[in-house]
Amino acid sequence: MIKEIIISMRPKQWYKNLVLFAGIFFSANLHNLHMLIIVLFSFIIFCILSGSEYIINDIMDKERDRIHPKKCNRPISSGKLNVLHALIFVALMLLAALAGAYLINVQFFVISLTYFLLIICYSSYLKHIAIVDVLTISIGFVIRAVAGCLAIGVFVSPWLIICAFLIALFLALGKRRHELILLENGASNHRKVLDDFSPEILDKMITIVTSVLIMSYSLYTFLTNNTFMMVTIPITIYGIFRYILLINSKNAGGNRKCCLRIRE
């Protein structure tokens, strides 16, 4: 059962919580061992929160997942993991995570709870609304970035907020475009909200977000006290352009193997 629970928590997706380290990185406090330990602890808490949310999402979507070519193999939809056992585990993990968040500080506890409630709303309703779905994903990344700052008590820069929001929005739109192109007529079977998008609309959105993202990040590095950050601008631009290249070549940007099964 433990193995099935761990699988349901999707550890492969926990890398998204690394954005919590943005605050300590951009405030040039990586050398501060105390702060580093707190951020690491915060990272673990958010992994527990996101993992618990994945389990709740699987419980809510178990009937739909059973007719999905890949999701039908998930522990809950396949029946390998009992729903009651999963709920008990989620309740215990949530209590532990929120208690740990409170021990860090009250502000971190509040934003951790806010993040969890936002993701629950996304899984139950918001993910089915075009544009709102990608905006919610982006807000989730902003909350992670702000949480990392609040955990160690550093200034939450407005530039950090806007850059985190834009990079998350850029990636979410890119993923939607990849899925839409790759799946073609079977797009709605994978994600219902894809019916409301088109490659042309997504290309326009991505162009706008890319332009604002590069400008915002460049201004952020210019205005920060750490002038060394300007060196990262070419690296950032390369990463953005590389991702655009990949999603347009249909070779990356989403779960290609799963998408191909759905289209078939």
Image (spheres, helix red, strand yellow):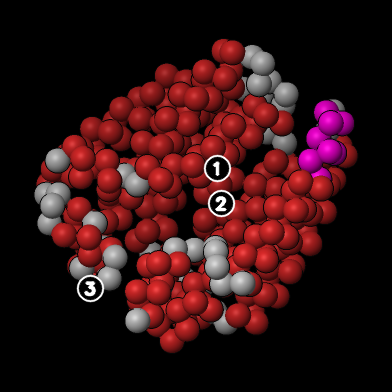
Measure the alpha-carbon separation of dots 3 and 1.
33 Å
Would you call the spot at circle 2 few (<14 residues within 10 Å), some (14-19), or many (20 or more)?
many
Picture quadrant where residue 62 is located: bottom left
229 part of magenta stretch? yes
* Whether residue 160 is situated above or below residue 198 in the rendered picture: above
Picture quadrant where residue 231 is located: top right
Q: Looking at the image, which is closer to me, 36 or 130? A: 36
Q: Are marks 3 and 1 in contact (CB under 8 Å)?
A: no
Where disc 1 sits, the SS reads: helix
Where disc 3 sits, the SS reads: loop
Report the mark closest to the observer, 3 or 1: 3
Task: Specify whether residue 112 is in view.
Answer: yes
Viewed as shown, does residue 169 lie left or right of 129?
Answer: right
Residue in the image at 68% along x and 20% along y: 29
- In the rendered image, residue 213, in percent from the top left (x then y), is placed at 75, 55
| Quarter the C terminus occupies | bottom left
Q: Looking at the image, which is closer to me, 227 or 148? A: 227
Instruction: Identify the mark at residue 143; answer none if there is no mark.
Output: 1
The number of numbered badges drawn on the structure is: 3
Amino acid type, mark 2 = Ile
- In the rendered image, residue 68, in percent from the top left (x then y), is placed at 27, 71
Q: Which residue is mark 3?
A: 67
Q: Which residue is mark 2?
A: 139
Residue in the image at 51% along x and 20% along y: 38
Please provide the residue range marked out in magenta: 226-233
Report the mark closest to the observer, 3 or 2: 3
